[in-house]
Amino acid sequence: MSLDLTDYAEKHGIKFYLFNFTDLIGTQRAKLVPAGKASRIQKAGAGFAPFAAWMDYSPSDPDMLVIPDTDSIIQLPWKPEIAWIAGDCWMDGALVGQAPRNVLKKLMAESAKQDLLMKAGVEPEFHIIAPDGSAISDERDVQMKPCYDQSTIMRRIDVIAEISSTMTQLGWNPYQCDHEDANGQYEINWDFSDALTCADQLAFFKFMTKSIAEKHGLRATFMPKPFSHLTGNGCHVHVSMWSLDEKTNHFADSAGELGLSDIGYNFIGGLLEHAESLAAITNPTVNSYKRINAPPTLSGATWSPSSISFGGNNRTHMIRIPDEGRIEHRLPDNSANPYLLMASLLAAGMHGINNKTDSGKRLDINMYTESHTVKDIRRLPLNLLDAIRLFESNEGLRSAMGDEFSQAYINLKNDEWNRFSCSLTDWEREHTLDC
């Protein structure tokens, strides 16, 4: 779709556009552009000082121009005079290599040369909490196993129903909503799509969910582990690879084990091979590793992997084969940058396909209780610093995602770790003040 944004605004009652991009840390950045000026800004690009956002630049670098992708336009159903539109980052007449959306589009263009299109669906979990972030918002949501609780979801029906109805209005086809495993935790599922559309939708979903919660005087958080005793927020990704005409699912094979093709198992092989390094992107915050390496929660299970393994319809593994023709990656959490999340899985999976990487045999055991019985089982990183170092040493994955992006990401994440290391926690004071 190619359209004049000013003309589009006149037809749809839009007064302002949010010209949007997502930075390396995953924060959405935008300029508010009056509809009457949108056509001119659309051609030239909205200018941003990249050092002022989380991009790896200095104050001396030139403006980064964001050119809106009109395929991504979304008119806000809860505030229809404003439209959100994702853009691509340019500088000095060239695409910015470290910009997350550009990284994903580059990898999708490379896989397209092999007539392969990655499709994905996501399961973003979130908590609805008090505005000050101190506790969940529903003081009656106290069951040890609150998952699917009907009464609890009805007490938050105004928020959940508005989010779901908004998604329906956008044409995303949400098909189920539920209270998840943790008190105060919810999940809404919608149709899968190509990886870029899915990433745009996930970015918008987080913005939309937070906005609607605020409208109701509440707060939504996608933090991986907002409460130590409760299950954390994952963002499971369901993946399949299709032909460009979207008629053939290359992961589907009725004669294959569990209905998965050789290409599907090679894709799994790539994800397994690069799992430790991928964690730097799929689990990119200090808090992420409180979810991965957590002890059993109030409900009795964390529902997050800690070992590198795959199985059939078994939720204790990092990768699950829930149905014919698709896989589920259960490691990612909701602090992951939506574009880098898709890009990293595509890069690792394509490496597996191109190298015919053997996935090995699946494990049909409970990994939470029996992982110690598996000889030489590989474990996921214990913290963000370990994950960043593993990504830095993975030349294949770094090359696939682009050297400019990889170095920029490593620089910013090392800085994040250093800032965390300089902070003084309550735990330290409690345990070592009198040492």
Image (tube, rainbow, N blue to C red):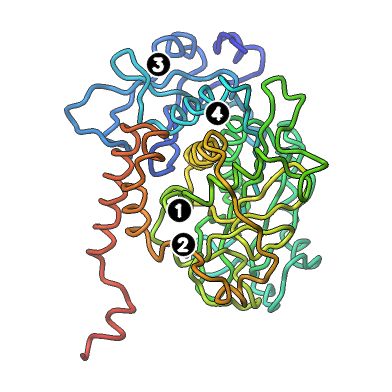
Q: Which residue in the rendered view is the most extreme toward the bottom?
A: 434
Nearer mark to the viewer, of 1 and 3: 1
Q: Which residue is mark 4?
A: 84
- Mark 2 Cα-neighbour bin, 10 Å: few <14, some 14–19, many ≥20: many
Image point (68%, 47%), residue name: 327
Tell which circle, 2 or 4, labels the residue nearer the N-terminal end: 4
Real-space CA distance between mark 2 and mark 4, rounded to the nearest whole angstrom: 37 Å
Real-space CA distance between mark 2 and mark 1, rounded to the nearest whole angstrom: 8 Å
Q: Position of residue 202 (x, y in %)?
A: 59, 40
* Left or right of 354, for residue 22: left
Q: Which residue is mark 2?
A: 380
Marking on residue 279? 1
Type of amino acid under label 2: Leu
Type of amino acid under label 3: Gly
Disc 2 and disc 1 in contact, CB within 8 angstroms: yes
* Left or right of 312, for residue 268: left
* Residue 182: quadrant of the picture: bottom right
Q: Which residue is mark 3?
A: 45
Real-space CA distance between mark 3 and mark 2, rounded to the nearest whole angstrom: 41 Å
